[in-house]
């Protein structure tokens, strides 16, 4: 129980801290640009649905799957030669297995990516960008193994540096299709086995969950943390400052040590976009 409380406190506080950083960066980036006529900025709010498959060998060898409602906030700055993208998505779901076992999953994904222009094709309608990104995944799991058994808690906390590629295809004066992909180069990971043995480590961080992350996590290379994030979106401008975005996202990651875990998520979002 103490482990679950510590993990939940860290998850909530890390989400709030990163969301505050997201808002601060957004304000600092956009205030100097509000007086400009060119609409280089957009912010979107959206709701979606994603299908999840996950397995965590620290708690259960079974595969769990199910649908999850997803909330998303996205900000993008489009310069003449660069792109800045901030994204926050979160959801909660109840997943099932092939038996009566269930798992409650709380999921948060935060990312920042910078892209620089590389080349253009198809009469400059298709633009290619490349860059780096920083991504944080927080996945809190509560397993309900069977009636009469103790529930088991587990989680993933992974902050990773990504190599990213972005392509934009203009299909009208203000409409576009965007395809993006990024894959991790290295990561900093917190998994249960890093903190549960010895159990005395848990009590040290009750009053400071953020120290729990930095005190017990480990750096990992691509041999231990592998993943892929791919998204495809279509932006349709409805009015001068309003657009509609349909976004499909495929995300996959796998952590091998100290015990293997992984997640595959297919999501579809509908976002309302404000251009400024």
Image (cartoon, rainbow, N blue to C red):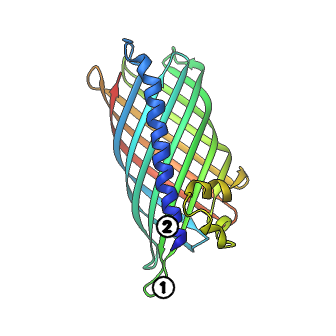
Q: CA distance from mark 2 to mark 1?
A: 19 Å
Q: Which residue is mark 2?
A: 5
Q: Position of residue 6 (x, y in %)?
A: 53, 64
Up the image or down, 37 lies above or below 73; here it is: above
Q: Is residue 170 visible?
A: no
* Residue 149 numbered tag: 1
Question: Is residue 194 shown to the viewer in this render?
Answer: yes
Query: Whole-percent x and y of residue 20?
Result: 45, 40
Could you tell me which residue is drawn at 37 percent across and 13 percent down?
35
Q: Residue drawn 68% across and 72% down?
A: 197
Instruction: Please report the residue visible at 35 percent of the width from the left and 21 percent of the height from the top.
Output: 276
Relative image position of residue 100 (x, y in whole percent): 42, 79
Q: Few, some or many C-alpha atoms within 10 Å of disc 1 (few <14, some 14-19, many ≥20)?
A: few
Decide: is 157 above or below 94. Answer: above
Quarter assignment of residue 66: bottom left
Q: Residues within 10 Å of mark 2 (few under 14, many from 20)?
A: few
> Is residue 265 or residue 110 the one in the foreground?
110
Q: Position of residue 32 (x, y in %)?
A: 44, 17
């Amino acid at each position: 129980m103490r482990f679950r409380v510590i993990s939940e406190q860290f998850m909530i506080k890390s989400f709030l801290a990163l969301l505050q950083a997201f808002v601060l960066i957004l304000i600092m980036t956009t205030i100097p640009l509000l007086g400009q006529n060119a609409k280089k900025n957009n912010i979107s709010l959206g709701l979606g649905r994603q299908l999840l498959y996950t397995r965590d060998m620290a708690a259960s060898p079974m595969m769990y799957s199910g649908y999850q409602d997803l909330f998303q906030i996205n900000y993008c700055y489009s310069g003449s030669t660069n792109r800045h993208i901030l994204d926050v998505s979160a959801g909660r779901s109840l997943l099932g297995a092939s038996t009566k076992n269930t798992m409650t999953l709380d999921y948060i994904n935060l990312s920042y990516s910078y892209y620089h222009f590389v080349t253009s094709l198809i009469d400059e309608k298709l633009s290619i960008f490349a860059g780096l990104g920083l991504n944080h995944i927080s996945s809190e799991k509560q397993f309900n193994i069977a009636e009469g058994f103790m529930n088991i808690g587990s989680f993933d906390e992974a902050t990773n540096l990504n190599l990213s590629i972005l392509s934009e295809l203009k299909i009208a004066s203000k409409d576009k299709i965007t395809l993006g992909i990024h894959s991790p180069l290295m990561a900093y990971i917190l998994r249960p086995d890093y903190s549960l043995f010895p159990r005395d480590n848990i009590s040290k961080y009750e009053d400071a969950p953020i120290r729990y992350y930095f005190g017990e996590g480990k750096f990992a290379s691509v041999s231990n943390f592998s993943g892929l994030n791919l998204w495809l979106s279509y932006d349709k401008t409805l009015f001068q400052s309003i657009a509609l975005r349909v976004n499909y996202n495929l995300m996959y990651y796998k952590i091998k040590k100290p015990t293997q875990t992984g997640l595959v998520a297919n999501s579809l979002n509908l976002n309302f976009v404000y251009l400024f």
